[in-house]
Image: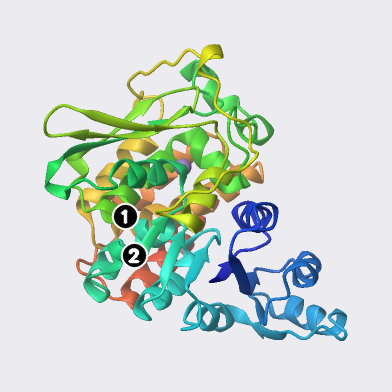
Amino acid sequence: MLNVVILGSTGSIGRQALEVIESLELDCRVTALAAHSNYQELLEQCHRFSPSRVALVDENSALQLKESSGELDVEILQGQEGLIELASDREADLVMVATVGFSGFLPTLYALRNGRKVALANKESLVVGGELLAREVPEYKELIIPVDSEHSAIYQCLQGEKRESVKKLILTASGGPFLNTSPEHLPEVTPAQALKHPNWAMGPRITIDSATFMNKGFEVLEAGWLFGVELENIEVVVHPQSIVHSLVEYQDGSVLAQMGTPDMRVPIQYSLTAPGRKSNSFPALDLNSQSLSFHEPDTEKFPCLRLAYEAGKTGGTMPACLNAADEVAVELFLKGIIKFTDIAKYVEMAMKEHELVSEPSLEDIIEADRVTRNELKKIVARLG
Ligand code: MN
């Protein structure tokens, strides 16, 4: 019996994880759940899974939950400290970190410090904190099972292989909704258009990040830390069908790929059963009705991919700046304040103005995140 803690249980990944656990009758006990503020859904999840503890980051929502939980036998924690406490639980066999944004970093760090296995769906943890994590918890690579579909694919392709046999990692990118939009039309695209991802159903920030290719840039940095591969040995290939989820090229020229339908439940399930597998009733891949194509990404049209490689190669607090600037820019785009093409423009500006700290402490990273957000908001207010 696997004791599982799920942080971000009311988000897209968290909900699907609970669905997988319930529908496949996996040998799991959900011991704790945490969410940002959606107390109604968390309450409903408490009735379904009977966790012994839950946490809500938003303190008002935690209060609401206390008022509406009635006779439910559950301990209710609140704030970021609540999340950290659940992540550090030594009774947990697996902590799934499925929160959105940089806030997922601290729980990930605490879970790993306490030697917990982490099913990681929060990419910012590695994008922003990879360097610090490598210093603080040198054995982190053995403790993390990726949930991101590309990284799950690579993780699966690496099973039973020697790390020194790996030549290259190749991440596939769907290309998002604007793959075939001409560059002159990109400034006019609306949030509604950007939120329509052709293959994957995901949360709003990651969907916009997919449209700009920033998501793929984050995934390159994530893969670098997760698998200990230099960024120059990680490539991105556009594969609009999202059937090949990623590939590993070996020294002998063999290339292994993991394939499947674009369904996040599969990598989520694998993170809960790895290295074992369990049958399910999800739609099977039918290769008879598929043609697969691959081509090089256009980094002129989608500069975010280039910016992410740059931030990763610079290291230190630069990835924290990249992530914070992107988070602010995406939010402003979704509110209709800036154009789609301004996202990359503002991220690049923030990176140019960033005062780099190498070998950053946790405080340096938090400060870089805070300063970047404030400065970028000022720049946008000035430039309109
Ligand atoms: Mn992905």
Q: Residue 378 at x, y = what percent?
A: 49, 57
Between 213 and 14, the one nearer to me in the picture = 14
Residue found 73% across the figure and 84% down from its top:
74
Q: Is residue 19 above or below residue 341?
A: below
Check disc 2: other Cα within 10 Å, few if <14, some if 14-19, many if 20+: many
Q: Is residue 273 left or right of residue 195?
A: left
Q: Is residue 324 visible?
A: yes
Between 170 and 181, the one nearer to me in the picture = 170
Q: Residue 304 at x, y = what percent?
A: 39, 38
Q: Which residue is mark 2?
A: 129
Q: Residue 166 at x, y = what percent?
A: 17, 41
Q: Is residue 103 visible?
A: no
- For label 1, the SS is helix
Q: Is residue 237 left or right of residue 213?
A: left
User: What separation in Å lies between label 2 and label 1 (alpha carbons)?
Assistant: 20 Å
- Upstream in sequence: badge 2 or badge 1: 2
Residue found 40% across the figure and 62% down from its top:
125
Q: Amino acid at mark 2?
A: Gly
